[in-house]
Image (cartoon, rainbow, N blue to C red):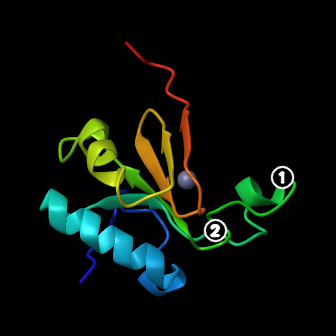
Amino acid sequence: MLSLSPAHSNSKVFLESELAPELRLALSKLQRELGTSLYYTSGYRPPTHPIEAIKPKPGTHARRIAVDIACNGNFISCDTIHTYALKHFDGIGRYNTHIHLDLRGYPARWDKRTNRK
Ligand SMILES: [Zn+2]
C-alpha cells in the first residue's frame, strides 16, 4: 500500500486515487525498494491550476502521471531517489527541494537546481 504523506502540514490533502494506476504501481515499487515513506510536494494538478494553465498543453501532472517528491530533507536524498527511480519512471526532473517523476512514455531528464556543486 502506498503511503505518501504531505510534506507540509498546510498542503492540500493528497488523494492517491487522483493518480493514474500505473503511476501508483511505480511509486509503490519505488517505495518498497527504498524502504521508506515518500513525501510528496505535488501530485495531480487540474488543467486550471496556475502552473498548468500557462502551459501550451496540459503537463504530466494534469495527465495524472506525475508526482513531485520532497528530498534534501532529513529523510532521503534526491540522489538516492533518482538512482532507484531510473528503472521505474520516464521523466525525471531535479529541483532544489524535490524530484519530479513521471510516466510520459519516453525518457526525459532535466535539472533545474540552482545550487549545484
Ligand atoms: Zn513535477
Instruction: Describe residue 13's horizontal placement relative to residue 73 as left or right.
Output: right
Instruction: Describe residue 1's horizontal placement relative to residue 99 as left or right.
Output: left
Q: Is residue 26 visible?
A: yes
Name the amino acid type tagged 1.
Ile
Quadrant of the drawing holding the N terminus = bottom left
Q: Is residue 74 above or below residue 2?
A: above
Name the amino acid type tagged 2.
Arg
Give how far across and how far down residue 35 sits, in percent.
Answer: 12, 62
Assign a secondary structure to mark 2.
loop
Give how far across and how far down residue 8 sits, in percent.
Answer: 37, 57
User: How far is disc 1 from disc 2 in space, using C-alphas?
Assistant: 13 Å
Q: Quadrant of residue 30?
A: bottom left
Quadrant of the drawing holding the C terminus = top left
In this figure, which residue is indicated by the disc labeled 1?
54
* Upstream in sequence: badge 1 or badge 2: 2
Q: Which mark is residue 45?
A: 2
Q: Quadrant of residue 73?
A: top left
